[in-house]
Amino acid sequence: MVNYNIILIIALIIVALSMLAMLIRVIIGPSLADRVVALDAMGIQLMAIIALFSIFLGTKYLIVAILMIGILAFLGTAVFAKYMDKGKVIEHDRNDNH
């Protein structure tokens, strides 16, 4: 019989190594777009690591952390995309007196 804990540990190591490769892409990336995509991929890999760790521990309480990381990764990608498109994140309307 296959011990599933060994499979989970191997999967955690593989995802951690791929996360390390994405970190190198974030640091060295030839363009800003490559760095943004690598950073988004790191968020997805972090969610995978937490999910595998949750399975390893046999708990379901880490699902909230996965959801929060997913929301933050999406917002970060959206902010970087807006920065790449317009050059600034927050635009101020000159006619708005608030």
Image (cartoon, rainbow, N blue to C red):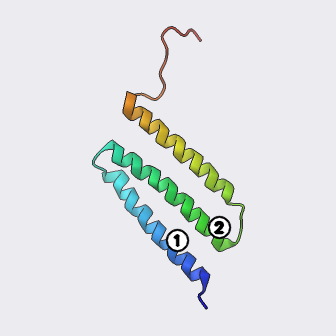
Q: Is residue 51 above or below residue 30?
A: below
> In terms of secondary structure, where does tag 2 sit?
helix
Quick check: 42 above or below 58? above
Query: Crowding at label 2, few (<14), some or many (≥20) Cα neighbours within 10 Å?
Result: some
Taking the spot 67% from the left edge, 60% from the top edge, the residue there is 62
Residue 47's spot in the image, x, y percent? 56, 58
The residue positioned 61% from the left and 91% from the top of the image is 1
Count all numbered tags in the image, as a single digit: 2
Q: Secondary structure at mark 1?
A: helix
Is the C-beta separation of discs 1 and 2 under 8 Å?
Answer: no
Q: Which residue is mark 2?
A: 54
Cα distance, mark 1 to mark 2? 11 Å
The residue located at (58%, 51%) in the rendering is: 69
First in sequence: mark 1 vs mark 2: 1
Residue 87 visible to the viewer: no
How many residues crowd mark 1 within 10 Å: few (<14), some (14–19), many (20+)?
many
Relative vertical location of residue 61 with respect to residue 30 in this rendering, above or below = below
Residue farthest bottom in this picture: 1
Q: Position of residue 98 (x, y in %)?
A: 59, 12
Q: Is residue 63 left or right of residue 2?
A: right
Residue picked out by circle 1? 12
Residue at image x 31%, y 50%? 29
- x and y, in percent, of residue 89 in the image: 46, 29
Horizontal arrangement in the rendering, residue 51 relative to residue 88 (left or right)? right
Identify the amino acid type marked 2.
Ser
Asked whether residue 20 is in view, the answer is yes
Does 93 appear above or below 68?
Answer: above
Q: Image quadrant of residue 85?
A: top left
Residue type of the residue flagged with mark 1: Leu
